[in-house]
Amino acid sequence: MRATTFAIWLGVMALAFPTPARAQTIVTPLMSVNIKTSSGFIDLDEASTQTHVGVGVSVSRLTGWLGVDGEVMWTPSAFSGGDLVDTSRLVTATGRVLAIMPVRFRLRPYVSFGVGVAQIKSDDVAHLFAVDSSKPMATIGAGAWTWITPRVGIRANIDFLRTIRDVESGPFETWRPSAGVSIKF
């Protein structure tokens, strides 16, 4: 009886005082696509319903099961796709908090939530429905890292982004899956 009680207390103490995790900084160049997008303004080419490719970079700082992440993503021609919109783009910058699986697993899934800003620009050929707007936004997502070597891995995630304020006639919102090769420092 005493040995069992001692073993239980020893297990509880081991869980209560884990060894400190070493912080990791991870840089990930990313490719993304915007899908199921609602522009929040008059979309002359109805291009927001199409898939648009973007590029960006993410810098993450992980300690144990928590982390922070900053990401900048650029999607050229995000609202172009026909003859009526001359130029368009979407630039997003977000800061997120990550809740991540512990280090001892090779596959590290995570969930994230954060805030940021979306810079939306769209200009039609007649300059009648021009949009140049920066709006605060919120994001929620999930993803995973898998490590090929101790310093190189692959990151994949999907985020839902939505502006907190209306762009013109409504909020901008989109689903954005992305993936990239991560480098751990």
Image: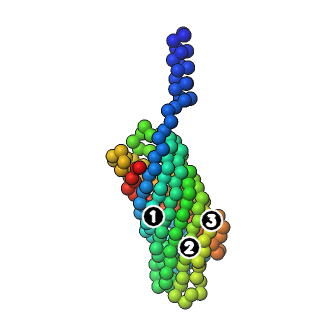
The local secondary structure at tag 1 comes to strand
Q: Are marks 1 and 2 in contact (CB under 8 Å)?
A: no
Picture coordinates of residue 79 (x, y %)? 51, 75
Name the amino acid type tagged 1: Gly
| Lower sequence index among marks 3 and 1 | 1
State the separation of the CA atoms marked 1 and 2: 16 Å
Q: Quadrant of the N terminus?
A: top right
Circle 1 Cα neighbour tier, 10 Å, few/some/many (<14 / 14–19 / ≥20): some
The local secondary structure at tag 3 comes to strand
- The residue lying furthest to the bottom in this view is 126
| Lower sequence index among marks 1 and 2 | 1
Name the image quarter holding residue 167: bottom right
State the separation of the CA atoms marked 2 and 3: 11 Å
Picture coordinates of residue 51 (x, y %)? 45, 69
Circle 2 Cα neighbour tier, 10 Å, few/some/many (<14 / 14–19 / ≥20): many
Coloration mode: rainbow
Picture coordinates of residue 151 (x, y %)? 36, 48
| Lower sequence index among marks 2 and 3 | 2
Name the amino acid type tagged 3: Pro
User: Circle 1 is placed at which residue position?
Assistant: 56
Name the amino acid type tagged 2: Ile
Residue 61 against residue 104 in the figure, above or below: below
Residue drawn at x 54%, y 29% is 17
Picture coordinates of residue 120 (x, y %)? 56, 73
Residue drawn at x 44%, y 52% is 26
Kindly identify which numbered label has been placed on residue 136. Answer: 3
User: Circle 2 is placed at which residue position?
Assistant: 120
Name the image quarter holding residue 32: bottom left
State the separation of the CA atoms marked 3 and 1: 19 Å
The local secondary structure at tag 2 comes to strand
